[in-house]
Image (tube, rainbow, N blue to C red):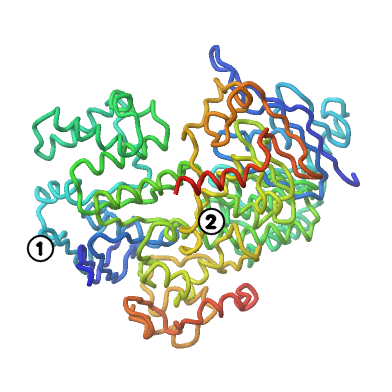
Amino acid sequence: MATKHIIVDDLSVEYLGATKKIYALQHVSLDINRGESIALVGESGCGKSTLGVSFINLLPLNSRITSGTIKFISNSKEIDIFKTPTSELQKLRWSKIVMMAQGALNAFNPVMRIRDHFIDTAYSHGWKNKTEILNKARYLLKRVHLDSERVLSSFPHELSGGMRQRVLLSLGLLLNPEVVILDEPTTALDILTQRNIIELLKELKKEFNFTLIFITHDLSLAAELADRVAVMYAGKAVEVGDVYDIFATPYHPYTAGLITSTPKLRGESTEVTSIPGSPPNLSEIFKGCPFYERCPLRSNVCINSQPKLTAVEEKDGHLVACHHASKNTLEHIKQGDWLSTIQ
Amino acid sequence: MEELMIELNNITKFYRKRNKVIKVINKVDLKFKDDEILCLVGESGSGKTTLGKIIAGLIEPTEGEIKYNGKLLKQMGSKEAKEIRRAIQMIHQDPFASLNPVRSVYQTLSTPLLYYNIVKGEKETKKKVLELLEVVDLTPAEDFIYKYPHQLSGGQRQRVAIARALTVNPKFIVADEPVSMVDASIKASIINTLKRIRKEFKVGFLFITHDLALARLFGGDGKLGVMYTGRIVEYGFTDDIIGNPKHPYTITLLSAVPEPDPAVTRAKKRVKLRSDDIPRLDSLPDGCHFHPRCPLFIEGKCDKLLPELRAIHSRHYVACFVEDAERKILEMTREND
């Protein structure tokens, strides 16, 4: 039985705009197990990045947590992330939970050498011995297949995107974190660089045994790296389950739609069925299912009643939020021509 | 103009920066007709966008010539040149940058229509604009016609950019990563729209992408060129190349692509390169540009001579000295296991 590492319970977050509110997360509950690798998958605006920063309570100032908690379990103690004072949180961040935001490889201080990035980070978490810090840094840089001496004395602009991504990973592991959160770790990288980062993440995870949470819009990356997948849509988790189950038998029509709309390199089909329409406006609270407008399986019950994330009958730990979910969803989606059924 | 034949001879593009010469395109020969689908794949910096812009007539090559129906642009009279420029249109990568933010959809689409005298009068223009919006699946068209780019999502903007390319009845469209900036669920529907346009309007496409699966999806029945450091290293029918790649670089790319199925993607054999670094374009290595990374590198040959693109059988071309590369690489990965 897997032990829980992070428990997200009924989390809702809203952003306050000039004229309207955006309900970015709506009653999200999700358990993350110790040592697993979980992918948060969804399109832009589905709330996956908001959930990512919630783990370390770094939500922007115009946001408000309207319900729910996030509990982080470390040394069999439960830490309530939203109730922890900032001074404690600052110690927690980077030492226990590391978050690498999207594009963080462009966030190095341009006038500091890589060496000083390592030293600064370690100093602010109470390390004193410079040699010790640099030895650890050297080991980690070698671990990500970089020439440690050259990189340590380089400025960020002297390194390529792939190299900076790898430096960032080793900087992230400097304080032996328990949880590593990566937001779009391979977007904007080339195919071969992306492949290197994927292989590296697999190796590092094996060696350091951290819990990996990664946020991506790329289903293939989830297929490659994740043990479990949480599919998000319009601020909600709509399907959660084992990676093999999710890809082989998705229960939610949105998950099935994402799968059928991803082009494949091998296999017969050179056709994809796309999901019609576009994601909904998040400035309203949904009465019914947020996917209703785009869903081929919809019926009247979906208009007024919001489906709850519940376990499917056939499989333990596979959760879905849909009134019409079944193990045949993928077949339905493949057979039905979405564009012709919905106008 | 009945049909259009585009021919690139020995196209080379250099940029100068201080004392350095950056070789972006290196002696590319290509020949295709306006009813063909041609995909270009490669990593950033491989020169695929530059080549696309040269074909669209937006950039002049440093050396070599590009002929349209056997003629150079500068040999043509202004009327004929204008006709060529009309016949080849471009869709750019970033719809957030390619649309003028202070022009409504109507203004964006009506300007080329009026410039080329395709329509006359306001009524006809509006009718044509609405028609174009229907073609690119922006329906109901009345809802979109007076919108400004900031009121549209990324996918909708890209559809406007596609409609703009279609305004002047082109014969050939250069599409530079048209879906790399839009979301997964929207990506497939834009590709389906483009495929429909291909058939309905009988336009040819140069489709530039870094995603091999996308190249297969859009141009599975067309041709594929794989680019590396400004050269085409493999060229042929898309199906042939994906099913039976010949160049070690193509083989590496195909092995590196993650696939949307955990069972498939985790069972894939990955090719290990000798080096991860792409050579700098201002100091390309001697011989084959891929040799410092190539697992099948032959000393004394690959680092001395630049392999020409040669036909291995009719209509499959590869620029590599090694025969039977795929089998050799497969054996190497097996030994490493």
Q: Residue at x 29, y 62 (%)?
A: A14
User: Quarter of the image containing the N terminus of chain A?
Assistant: bottom left
Q: Position of residue A202 (x, y in %)?
A: 35, 51
Of A180 and A50, the residue lying toward us: A180
Are the residues tagged 2 and 1 within 8 Å (C-beta)?
A: no
Q: Is label 1 in a helix, a strand or a loop?
A: loop
Residue extending furthest toward the front: B335
User: Quarter of the image containing the C terminus of chain A?
Assistant: bottom right
Chain letter of mark 2 equals: B
Q: Amino acid at mark 1?
A: Ser
Q: Residue at x 60, y 60 (%)?
A: A266
Residues at marks 2 and 1, CA–CA distance in whole angstroms: 49 Å
In the rendered view, tell whether residue B166 sits above or below residue B142: above
Which label belongs to residue A76? 1
Residue at which label 2 appears: B152
Locate residue A131 relative to residue B144 in the image: left or right: left
